[in-house]
Amino acid sequence: MGNIWAVAVIVGPILLLAVAIYVWARNRNANRASIRRSERGARDLREDLEEKQDRTVDL
């Protein structure tokens, strides 16, 4: 049982760091069209959340 924890404690952070570096490198090379599309999606989501919040407010 101790060996499993030792492997998890050592490999876990290394795997997490590797995934973080991969995601950072992949997002760094995003083209303008995908950036505009993601910005538009985020703006639409914020507007939808604001509308939903306005409808659920009890006065």
Image (cartoon, rainbow, N blue to C red):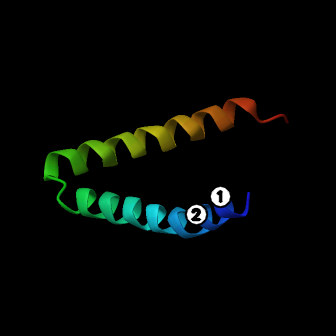
Q: Quadrant of the N terminus?
A: bottom right
Residue at image location 22% in from the left, 63% down from the top: 28
Task: Check disc 1 and report the residue beneath it.
Answer: 4
Q: Quadrant of the C terminus?
A: top right
Query: Which sits in the foreground, 8 or 16?
Result: 8
Residue 4 placement, left or right of 24: right
Query: How many C-alpha atoms fall within 10 Å of the one at disc 2: few (<14), some, or many (≥20)?
Result: few
Query: Which sits in the foreground, 37 or 59?
Result: 37
Residue 52 placement, left or right of 20: right
Q: Is residue 50 above or below residue 55?
A: below
- What label sits on residue 25 in the rendered view? none
Q: Is residue 6 above or below residue 45?
A: below
Task: Check disc 2 and report the residue beneath it.
Answer: 7
Under tag 2, what secondary structure?
helix
Q: Position of residue 17 (x, y in %)?
A: 43, 67
Residue at image location 46% in from the left, 68% down from the top: 14
Query: Which sits in the foreground, 36 or 22?
Result: 22
**Measured Cα–Cα span from mark 2 to mark 1:** 5 Å
**Residue type indicated by callout 2:** Val
**Residue type indicated by callout 1:** Ile
Q: Is residue 53 above or below residue 18?
A: above
Under tag 1, what secondary structure?
helix
Q: For the residues labelled 2 and 1, say whether their Cβ atoms are less than 8 Å apart.
A: yes
Residue at image location 25% in from the left, 63% down from the top: 25
Q: Position of residue 50 (x, y in %)?
A: 58, 41
